[in-house]
C-alpha cells in the first residue's frame, strides 16, 4: 500500500487525532480537505470507518469495510471491521463466517478469536465461545483479554466462567 504524500497525509493524521479527542465533525473536516480520489486511499478509508462506527452508522461502516477488504485482503483490520459492522447490524452469523474464513491466515491477532468468542456466545454456543476466548488469552495476554471480556456485553452470559479464568 502506497503512503499518502504531504499535505494529504497530514490531513488524515489530523482526522485521526480529532477522533482520539472525540470530535467527529473536526475529523470529517480534515478528511474533506482531501481530493475525492484520495478518499479511497486505505488510510482515509480506515478513518472513515471509525467515523461511521462512532456515529453507529453500521450500513455505511460495512460499505467502507468492504472497500478496505477489497483493497488490502492481507490486512486483518479490514476483515475485523467488516465482521464488527455485520455483527452490529444483527448479522452475527455472517460476521462469524467472515472471520472464520481468515482466522488461519492471522493466527497471532488476538481480536479475531476474541470476536469469534463474542459471536459464538451471542449465537448460543457458549462452549465454542469459551474455547475461543482462551485462545485469545493465549495470544493477547490474560490480563488484557480477561479485562475486555468482563466488560463486554456480548460475553455477559459467560461472566462467571470468565472470572474463573
Image: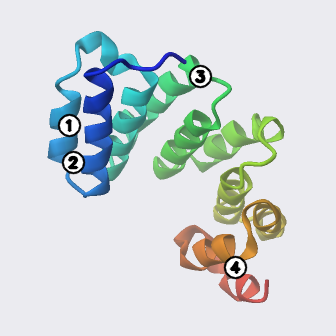
Helix or strand or loop: what does disc 2 sit on? helix
Mark 1 is surrounded, within 10 Å at the Cα level, by few (under 14), some (14 to 19) or many (20 or more) other residues, namely: many
Task: Please determine whether, in this image, residue 110 is positioned above or below residue 71.
Answer: below
Helix or strand or loop: what does disc 1 sit on? helix
The residues bearing labels 4 and 3 have C-alpha atoms spaced at a distance of 34 Å
Query: Are the residues at dot 4 and dot 3 in contact (C-beta closer than 8 Å)?
Result: no
Mark 4 is surrounded, within 10 Å at the Cα level, by few (under 14), some (14 to 19) or many (20 or more) other residues, namely: some
Helix or strand or loop: what does disc 4 sit on? helix
The residues bearing labels 3 and 1 have C-alpha atoms spaced at a distance of 23 Å
- The numbered dot on residue 158 is 4
The residues bearing labels 2 and 3 have C-alpha atoms spaced at a distance of 25 Å
Q: Nearer the viewer, residue 66 or 40?
A: 40
The residues bearing labels 4 and 1 have C-alpha atoms spaced at a distance of 38 Å
Quickly name the residue at label 3: 72
Q: In which quarter of the image is the C terminus?
A: bottom right
- The numbered dot on residue 24 is 2
Please report the residue visible at 43 percent of the width from the left and 34 percent of the height from the top.
46
Side of 147 where 158 appears, left or right: right
Q: Position of residue 102 (x, y in %)?
A: 75, 35
Task: Please determine whether, in this image, residue 27 is positioned above or below residue 138.
Answer: above
- The numbered dot on residue 28 is 1
First in residue order: circle 4 vs circle 3: 3
- The numbered dot on residue 142 is none
Amino acid at each position: 500500500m502506497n503512503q499518502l504524500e504531504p499535505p494529504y497525509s497530514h490531513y488524515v493524521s489530523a482526522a485521526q487525532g480529532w477522533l482520539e479527542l472525540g470530535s467527529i465533525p473536526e475529523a470529517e473536516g480534515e478528511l474533506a480537505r482531501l481530493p475525492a480520489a484520495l478518499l479511497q486511499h486505505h488510510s482515509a478509508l480506515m478513518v472513515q470507518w471509525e467515523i461511521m462506527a462512532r456515529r453507529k452508522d453500521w450500513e455505511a461502516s460495512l460499505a467502507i469495510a468492504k472497500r478496505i477488504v477489497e483493497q488490502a485482503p492481507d490486512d486483518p483490520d479490514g476483515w475485523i471491521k467488516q465482521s464488527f459492522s455485520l455483527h452490529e447490524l444483527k448479522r452475527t452469523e455472517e460476521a462469524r463466517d467472515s472471520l472464520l474464513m481468515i482466522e488461519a491466515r492471522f493466527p497471532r491477532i488476538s481480536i479475531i478469536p476474541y470476536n469469534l468468542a463474542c459471536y459464538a456466545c451471542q449465537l448460543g454456543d457458549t462452549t465454542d465461545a469459551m474455547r475461543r476466548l482462551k485462545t485469545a488469552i493465549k495470544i493477547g495476554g490474560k490480563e488484557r483479554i480477561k479485562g475486555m471480556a468482563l466488560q463486554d456485553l456480548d460475553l455477559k452470559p459467560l461472566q462467571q466462567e470468565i472470572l474463573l479464568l
